Amino acid sequence: MRKLRSVIFGLGAVLTVPAASAAGFQLGEFSAAAQGRANAGETAMTDTAASLARNSAVMGNFEGSSISIVYHYINPEVDVKGKLNNGTDASKKDIAPTAHIPGFYYIQGIDDKWAVGLSLNSHFGLATDYGNSYGGSEFANETSIKTYYLTPHVSFKPIESLTLGLGLSYIHGEGKIKNTAPNNFQAPIEVGGNIVQVPISQGSTIVDVEGDGDAFGYTVGLLWNADENTRVGFSYRSRVDLKLKGDVTKLGTAKQKGELTLNLPEVYELGVAHDLNDTFTLMGGLQKTGWHRFKELKGKSHGQVVFQKDENWRDAYRISAGAEWHVIEMLTLRGGIAYDESPVENDDRSLSIPDAARKWFTLGATLDLGKGGSIDAAFAYLKGSKVSVNETSLAEFDPSGLHPSSTADYNFKGGLSKTDAFIYSIGYNISF
C-alpha cells in the first residue's frame, strides 16, 4: 500500500484542489477536449484517451496505444457577504484559492475484443480559506478535501456494436476542517464551580480536524455504436465511504487522535454523440450525482463527537449540450453549455462548503500535429448563482459573551455574492 501511495503522489504531485467546479465538491476536469464542449456526451466520445475518466467502455473504439496528458488551471471567484448577529462584518472576497489539476490516461488495445487502460485523476475536492482575521471564523476558517484516484480499466466487446467496461479504483483522500476564534471572542470556562467568560485571542483554534485515508471503489460502463454516426454511452461510479484518520485539536484540549468520514456519492452519466456529417458533430449529456448520502461532516476522537455540521444534501443533476466543427483536417473547433444543479437547499448551505448552481459556457479547439499527435485547448466560464447563507452554530464558545451556555446561538446571515470560475485547459494526445 505504501508503494501504491508513492506512485499516486509521484504522478499527482502538482494536484491542488479548489472550490469544486461541479456541484457540491465534485470535480469534472478530465479531458481538455471535453472541457471545450462543456463535458457534453463524454461517455460516448472517443476522440482522446482522457474519455476513459467517464466511461471505461470507450476503450472499445480505440486501436493500438493512446495516451493523454491533461492540465487544468482553475481560477475561482467566490465572495461572501454578511454579518453576525452581534453586528460583526463577516464579508470576505476570494475565499477559494486557485488550483492546478493534472490527469494522466493510457489505453492499450489488445485485440478486436479486449482493451486495458489506466487513469490517474481526482473526482472530488474542495478548498476554502477565509484566514484568521475573518469575522466569522468560528463557522469557517479553512476547509480542504483532496482525492486521488488510480484506476486500472478493462473493456470487452461481446458484439461488434457494444462494448462493456470496468474500472477498479484505489482512492487516497486527505481532509482538513479548521475553525478559529474571531475578534472579541470569549469562551465560557468553569472556575471554582462558576462559569466565567474568558477572552480568547483572535486566530486561536476552536477545532482542527485533519487526516487522510484510503478506500476502494469501482466504475462500470457501456458504449453502444448504434450506427456509423451515433454513439450512446452510460457509466456508473460507485459510492465510497472514505474514513480519514489523523489528529484533532480543540480549544482547551491537547492534540489527540481522531477521524472524519466522507460519504462520497455514486454518479450516473448518460451521453449521446451524433455525427451530422464529416464536418459537424452534436453531443449531449445527463448526469445524476447521489449527494443524498452527504448528510453531515462529523469529526470524532475516542468515540466522542468533537465537530459536527449537518449538511442534508439532496441528489443533483447536470445537463449539457455541445457541438464540434471540423474546420479543416488539422483543426477542430467546439463549444458547449451546461447547467449544474446545486445539491444544497438554502436552509442547509454553510460557509465551509459554499455551493451554488452554475451555468457553463465553454469554447475549445484541437490542433492535429500529424503522426498521431494532437493538442487540445479549452476555456470555460462558470457563472454561479447568488444564494443566501443563514447559518446557526450551537457553539460551546459564544463570542457575544451574553450566553455562557453550551447551546448559545451564534448566527451568520448573508449569502454568496459571487460564485464564478474561469477554467483554462490544455491536453496533449498521442496514438501509436
Image (cartoon, rainbow, N blue to C red):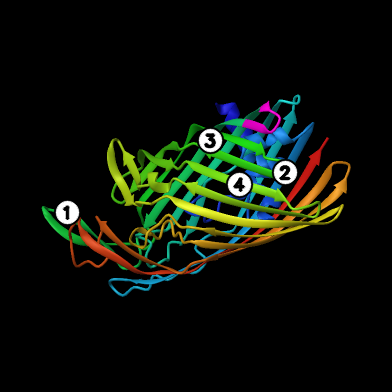
Instruction: Identify which residue is drawn at 58% across, 43% down.
Output: 122
- Is there a contact, CB below 8 Å, between mark 3 and mark 1? no
Question: Which one is closest to the eye, mark 1 or mark 2?
Answer: 2
Q: Earlier in the sequence, mark 3 or mark 1?
A: 3
Residue where numbered disc 4 is placed: 271
Query: The residue under label 4 is which amino acid type?
Result: Gly
Residue 74: which quarter of the image? bottom right
Q: Position of residue 381 (x, y in %)?
A: 62, 64
Identify the residue at horizontal 84%, vertical 50% (top origin): 368
For label 1, the crowd category at 10 Å Cα-Cα, with few meaning under 14, some 14 to 19 and many 20 or more, is: few
Sooner in the amino-acid sequence: mark 4 or mark 3:
3
162 drawn magenta: yes
SS for dot 3: strand
Q: What residue type is disc 1 on?
A: Glu
Task: Give the mark nearer the N terminus: 1 vs 4.
Answer: 1
Q: What type of secondary structure mainly makes up the magenta span?
A: strand
Q: Badge 3, how many Cα within 10 Å: few under 14, some, many 20+? A: many
Q: Which labelled disc corresponds to residue 190?
A: 1
Outermost residue toward the left?
A: 193
Q: Which residue is mark 2?
A: 69
Total labels drawn = 4
